Image (spheres, rainbow, N blue to C red):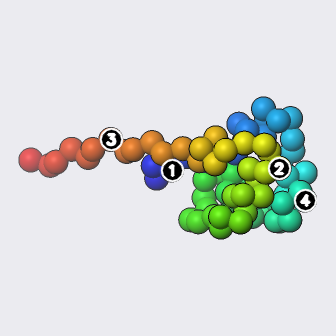
């Protein structure tokens, strides 16, 4: 998937644990872990806003777009 979640990087920069962030934004640590590992299919803007407010960051610091290389055509 071309969307990369850098939540673990931002957490490390802020010296914050996942459980502390989960409590601050009122989300379960399990759901936050799913987001952190990049397995989430979606995120609510209200959740993203709460995360950014708590971590004092921009959404672009958490989410990154890396296009996948074009697939080679089989000949």
Q: How crowded is mark 3: few (under 14 residues within 10 Å), some or many (20 or more)?
A: few
Closest to the camera, between mark 4 and mark 2, is 2
- Most extreme residue toward the top is 13
| Label 3: element kind | loop
Label for residue 57? none
Q: In which quarter of the view is residue 23 placed?
A: bottom right
Q: In which quarter of the view is residue 13 placed?
A: top right
Q: How far apart are marks 1 and 2 (CA)?
A: 22 Å
Q: How crowded is mark 2: few (under 14 residues within 10 Å), some or many (20 or more)?
A: few
Mark sitting earlier along the chain (3/2): 2
Q: Mark 3 points at which residue?
A: 69
| Label 4: element kind | helix
Q: Residues within 10 Å of mark 1 (few under 14, many from 20)?
A: few
Q: Distance between the residues labelled 3 and 4?
A: 38 Å
Q: Mark 4 points at which residue?
A: 23
Is label 3 in contact with label 2 (beta carbons under 8 Å)? no
- Percent of width and height locating residue 3: 51, 50
Q: Residues within 10 Å of mark 4 (few under 14, many from 20)?
A: few
Q: Distance between the residues labelled 1 and 3?
A: 13 Å
Mark sitting earlier along the chain (1/2): 1
Q: Mark 2 points at which residue?
A: 54
The answer to whether residue 13 is above or below residue 16 is: above
| Label 2: element kind | helix
Q: Distance between the residues labelled 4 and 1?
A: 25 Å
Determine if residue 19 is in view: no
Mark sitting earlier along the chain (4/1): 1
Q: Mark 1 points at which residue?
A: 3
Q: How far apart are marks 3 and 2 (CA)?
A: 34 Å
Q: Which of 62 and 36 is in front in this view?
A: 62
């Amino acid at each position: 998937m071309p969307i990369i979640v850098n939540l673990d990087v931002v957490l490390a920069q802020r010296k914050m644990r996942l459980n502390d962030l989960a409590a601050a934004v009122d989300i379960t640590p399990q759901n936050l872990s799913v987001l952190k590992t990049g397995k989430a299919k979606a995120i609510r803007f209200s959740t993203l806003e709460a995360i950014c407010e708590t971590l004092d960051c921009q959404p672009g610091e958490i989410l990154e777009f890396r296009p996948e290389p074009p697939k080679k055509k089989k000949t």
